[in-house]
Image (cartoon, rainbow, N blue to C red):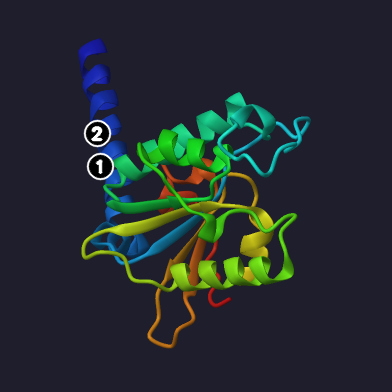
């Protein structure tokens, strides 16, 4: 009886695992992401808000910036593991110059290309602010290289001004570039939802 029971438990485990994999494979957006062609914007992972950014003229100095917490570093690892488990290809990973954005990208994806184009819009001139918002909108609508997805990692208020949405720390918004010139936001995903994308990702929201 024990051996029969063990066989039944093993069979149940196999069926459950196969069903989970099948659910991922059947998710239309997962399948599309696996083919590439999307731009995925992340707000940097969770940070220590007791630490302020005290030297915004020297962004190479991480000691004067709000850093990732242990939770934030774990969020970034979970994001990277989710992309690997779902076989989502990542091409360019473009970030703000702030260390929390670079660190999020490197932990999750193993690479980061920082640029002033999408660095924070806090404490900059109105002209610089508007230019960076325009830069982000253009990046969200720029098709990635064939067979890949572009990842952007930057900040809350810039994304809010560019899209009209606020993201939590570590949350992502998936965009599909459009010929109209205005990228379509198709889904928002929180850090812990990547591994169970087919089961628990946030509802679809379209447009800016």
From the top left corner, tell me how far across and down residue 2 is, in percent. 26, 11
Q: Residues within 10 Å of mark 2 (few under 14, many from 20)?
A: few
Residue lying at 56% horizontally and 52% vertically, measured from the top left: 154
Residue that numbered label 1 is attached to: 18
Along the line of sight, the residue nearer the viewer: 33 or 57: 57
Residue 198 against residue 127 in the figure, above or below:
above
| Spatial separation of the CA atoms under disc 2 and disc 1 | 6 Å
Furthest residue in direction top, as rendered = 2
| Residue 195 position in % (x across, y down) | 41, 41
Which residue is found at the position 38% from the left and 71% from the top? 142
Query: Mark 1: few, some, or many residues within 10 Å (few <14, many ≥20)?
Result: few
Task: Answer whether labels 2 and 1 touch (C-beta < 8 Å).
Answer: yes
Residue 26: name its quadrant: bottom left
State left or right for residue 123 relative to residue 77: right
Q: Is residue 121 left or right of residue 140?
A: right
**Which quarter of the rendered picture does the C terminus lie within?**
bottom right
User: At 78% across and 30% down in the image, what residue appears?
Assistant: 50
Q: Secondary structure at mark 1?
A: helix
Q: From this viewpoint, is residue 105 visible?
A: yes
Disc on res. 137: none
Q: Position of residue 10 (x, y in %)?
A: 25, 25
Given residues 98 and 74, the one toward you in this image is 98
Q: Position of residue 133 (x, y in %)?
A: 60, 69
Q: Residue at x 66, y 44 (%)?
A: 57
Can you identify the residue that label 2 sits on?
A: 14
Q: Secondary structure at mark 2?
A: helix
Q: Quadrant of the N terminus?
A: top left
Residue at the front extreme, as displayed: 57
Q: Number of numbered discs present? A: 2
Observer-nearest residue: 30 or 67? Answer: 67
- The answer to whether residue 164 is seen in the rendering is no
Q: Tell me: residue 62, above or below residue 26.
A: above
């Amino acid at each position: 009886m024990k051996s029969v029971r063990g066989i039944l438990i093993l069979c149940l485990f196999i069926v459950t695992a196969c069903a989970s994999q099948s659910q991922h494979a059947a998710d239309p957006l997962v399948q599309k992401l696996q083919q590439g062609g999307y731009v995925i914007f992340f707000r940097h992972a969770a940070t220590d808000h007791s630490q302020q950014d005290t030297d915004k003229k020297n962004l190479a100095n991480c000691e004067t910036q709000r850093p990732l917490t242990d939770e934030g570093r774990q969020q970034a690892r979970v994001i990277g593991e989710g992309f690997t488990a779902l076989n989502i290809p990542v091409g360019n990973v473009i970030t703000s110059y702030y260390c929390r954005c670079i660190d999020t990208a490197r932990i999750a994806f193993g690479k980061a290309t920082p640029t002033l184009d999408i660095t924070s819009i806090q404490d900059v001139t109105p002209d610089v602010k508007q230019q960076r918002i325009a830069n982000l909108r253009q990046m969200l609508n720029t098709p990635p290289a064939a067979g890949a997805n572009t990842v952007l990692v930057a900040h809350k208020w810039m994304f809010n001004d560019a899209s009209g949405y606020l993201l939590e720390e570590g949350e992502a918004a998936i965009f599909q570039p459009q010929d109209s010139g205005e990228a379509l936001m198709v889904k928002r995903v929180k850090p812990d939802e990547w591994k169970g994308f087919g089961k628990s990702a946030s509802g679809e929201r379209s447009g800016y």
